[in-house]
Amino acid sequence: MIWKTGSVRVASRPATAITNIAVSQPAIQAAALRGEAVATGMAAILAHARIAHEVAGRKVQQSGSDDDARPTLGAASGDPMTTSYDAIVIGAGQAGPPLAVRLAKAGLKTALIEREHLGGTCVNDGCIPTKTLIASARAAHVVRRAADWGARIDGPIGVDMKAVKARKDRVVADSIASLAKWMASTPGLSLIWGQARFVAPNAVEVDGARLEAPRIFINVGGRPVLPTWDGIADVPVLTNVSMMAIDTVPEHLIVAGGSYIGLEFAQMYRRFGARVTVVEYGDRLIAREDRDVSREVQAILEREGIAFHFSVQHARVSPGAGGSGVRVSLDAESGAEVVEGSHLLAAVGRKPNTDDLGLDKAGIATDARGYIVVDDELRTSVAGIWALGDANGRGAFTHTSYNDHQIVADNLLHGGQRKVSDRLTTYALFTDPPLGRVGMSEAEVRARAKPALVAVMPMTRVGRARERGETQGFMKVFVDAESERILGAALLCIEGDEIVHSILDVMAADASYKVIERAVHIHPTVSELIPTLLGQLEPLKDAPAPP
Ligand SMILES: Cc1cc2nc3c(=O)[nH]c(=O)nc-3n(C[C@H](O)[C@H](O)[C@H](O)COP(=O)(O)OP(=O)(O)OC[C@H]3O[C@@H](n4cnc5c(N)ncnc54)[C@H](O)[C@@H]3O)c2cc1C
């Protein structure tokens, strides 16, 4: 946490219901930064509190098809510390706020409970801040390469990490402020600060107050785990959360974990000027990807001077010489090695925030790793309780969490029949160049044991990449030989995270790849080469032959 949250408590009904509406300190800071009087934000919140007060005790119409167990809205249960709602949402991550707003707009008296910060991981210490930092890192990289494009910089090139962090903080604060404004301007929605714990299938407790609802939605997200290395408890370890407070360039950053989060930080800090070493358990980077993708990403990062150690099965970490920094002794593919670093970042995985949620009190089933078990419509094992976002193990991205809220809201409020299994797997690795991914990898295509076609194009053949002087990477696509449907693509190239959507949309439309092949694209772009790529499809070697 960079900032503490402040809260405004408003007694909406003496002793029976407390509407605890809070505004985060960053929201106030951001409002002030934008030149808005802080009182404006507070006025909005107090206005919201009044609305919440007026809604209490009033029967509200509920729209949609969910007719079961309609509660007496706003009625207290008799227990002075109990407040009844129509819906409770736990966690203000990427599914919670939009869901809470939709429920409230549908006329349901809704409580959104958050223990730390609006926007969850994505806004505070995930996607938004890291992509903001990556933009600064890319600027530094481009400036260093200026001569490649014929631009002259007379004088030293440096990175002002305090300015980099301040810019990141502003972007984050703006996002939080707009979320806070959205929540505060939604009638029928109460934002309650505190840690929620189930005490019954239809009730949670927050700071000793009991909240009940016939519908409860869990959006509690996850948190980083540390490597299980000997001595890890004896050294300072950074995570994606504490990295957000860094405003100096580490002399030598050791990154434990060569997957998506670790590699984004590795390249970013290398470009800020740190020495960077990545230590990976597996024998290659981003093991979920195909080997050719892993190899190319590694080559790109090695060209920038990042060092790697693979197959590190055993490591021991201790304070560095003189007590500062860290010393990692590892047993790697390359033999026994000692790496001395100034900082250690753990990027070895995440676990769901489900261990302190009182799930046993509600009887909600989890799997062996703590993820809440859900069906295709995100219902948990207990009727009236849904789980959305990273905590259900059905996605690990902002877009999957947001899509979870769309599935639940459409099904609940509009009689929809949306399912998690309808969505295509898609994501990006935001290195430079980025990797845009959709659908199956080559390993998954092969595992189908059906005829498939493949096409690969190195970026050195793409005019736009040559013009920009950024020809690293390649594009690869797989197609079902019989149905002509695209099975998957890996675009490791400039704008790969954007271009992949042209393929994704054709897949979502369940159309033949020939739709793209026949379309006329703008010249000169990377996208114009996608039809050319598809024109080069040939049978995937060693896969079953087309009929
Ligand atoms: C460094 C990093 C970079 C990332 N980059 C990307 C990216 O570029 N693109 C992408 O799609 N994804 C990215 N992700 C993943 C993305 O951040 C998450 O998938 C996304 O935030 C969705 O999470 P969520 O909605 O499940 O919950 P979260 O965003 O984690 O929010 C959960 C919220 O619940 C609150 N909470 C937890 N328990 C309780 C409780 N008991 N009571 C009250 N409140 C509680 C938490 O405080 C938190 O605010 C990144 C993640 C990391 C760590």
Image (spheres, helix red, strand yellow):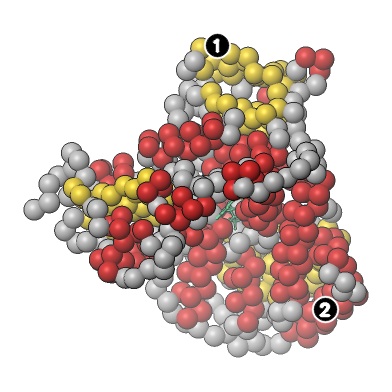
472 relative to 405, above or below:
above
224 relative to 462, above or below:
above
**Residue under numbered circle 2:** 44
Asked if marks 1 and 2 touch (Cβ < 8 Å), the reply is no
Checking the image for residue 170, the label placed there is none
Picture quadrant of residue 301: top right
Q: Residue 535: x percent and y percent?
A: 25, 57
Mark 1 or mark 2: whose residue is earlier in sequence: 2
**Residue under numbered circle 1:** 336
**Residue that extends furthest to the left in the rendered view of this protein:** 547
Picture quadrant of residue 171: bottom right
| Residue at the spot 60% in from the left edge and 59% down from the top edge | 219
| Residue at the spot 71% in from the left edge and 68% down from the top edge | 179
Horizontal relation, residue 153 to residue 409: left or right: right
Q: Nearer the viewer, mark 1 or mark 2?
A: 1
Mark 1: which amino acid?
Answer: Ala
Front residue of 207 and 137:
137
**Mark 1 crowd level (few <14, some 14–19, many ≥20, 10 Å Cα):** few
The number of numbered badges drawn on the structure is 2
